[in-house]
Amino acid sequence: MPLCPYTGLTGGGFPSTTPQTDPIEDVIRLATDTDRWLPAPGHLRGITDRLQIYIRATTQIIEAAVSDRPVDDPVRKEALAAVVEARYRLRIGPGNGYSSAITFARSLGRAAEELYRHRQGGAAPAVAGSAGAAVTVLPPSERCPMCLGLVGERRQAELRYDWTAMRRAGARLDGHRAAAHAV
């Protein structure tokens, strides 16, 4: 029985075994692996606290990083969607008891994992496609309106599964990059 029923607060009777020096990747892994192991209540509280701190800080960093991108840029849309989702998960908080605290930690871990992925990809983000060899990566020096327009065109063709239009837009992008950016 939790110390405070219907709050998800377990009392913190155990000291947190997640020191503040653990890399955030380890804390995220611990939170997302809670479907395979059940941490002590104090350890779970330490994981949740670290994830909440990380999410609050990272959402601001990601918002600032994508604020200079065009409004219809797919990277901006995905990053801001991850920020909105992470903030929502922060607001809902834990529910009743230990199982709800586990679910809350797991959801924070998944939100933090998505934010971590966006933050790591900030230097040279994939602005078209989601995976594989067809991903187009534009460094900040090549984000001119023409490049972004062609990348958007290619992305729309990819979403329609129109491979011919996708290859055509990709070839036009490669030609533009070679001519304008000497790539």
Image (cartoon, grey):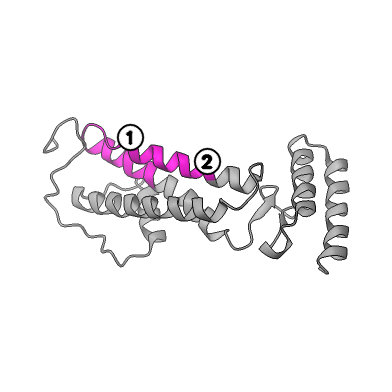
Q: Eyeballing the image, is 103 above or below 21?
A: above
Q: Which residues are magenta?
A: 80-108
Q: Is residue 92 left or right of residue 176?
A: left
Residue 35, visible in the rendered structure: no
Residue 56, visible in the rendered structure: yes
Q: CA distance from mark 1 to mark 2?
A: 17 Å
| Residue 92, label in figure | 1
Q: Which residue is mark 2?
A: 81
Compare residues 38 and 158 and report the one nearer the observer: 158
**Rendering coords of residue 165 (x, y %):** 86, 41
Amino acid type at mark 2: Ala
Secondary structure under tag 2 reads: helix
Q: Residues within 10 Å of mark 1 (few under 14, many from 20)?
A: few
**Rendering coords of residue 144 (x, y %):** 75, 56
Residue 5 in which image quadrant: top left
Q: In the image, what residue occupies the spot 26% across and 60% down?
A: 18
Dot 1 or dot 2, earlier in sequence: 2
Q: Which quarter of the rendering shows the C terminus?
A: bottom right
Q: Is residue 183 left or right of residue 80?
A: right
Q: In the image, what residue occupies the spot 44% across and 52% down?
A: 60
Q: Which quarter of the rendering shows the N terminus?
A: top left
Q: Residues within 10 Å of mark 2 (few under 14, many from 20)?
A: few
Amino acid type at mark 1: Ile
**Rendering coords of residue 32 (x, y %):** 39, 48
Q: Is residue 36 left or right of residue 150?
A: left
Q: In the image, what residue occupies the spot 73% across and 37% down?
A: 159
Type of secondary structure dominating the magenta stretch: helix
Q: Is residue 17 left or right of residue 106?
A: left
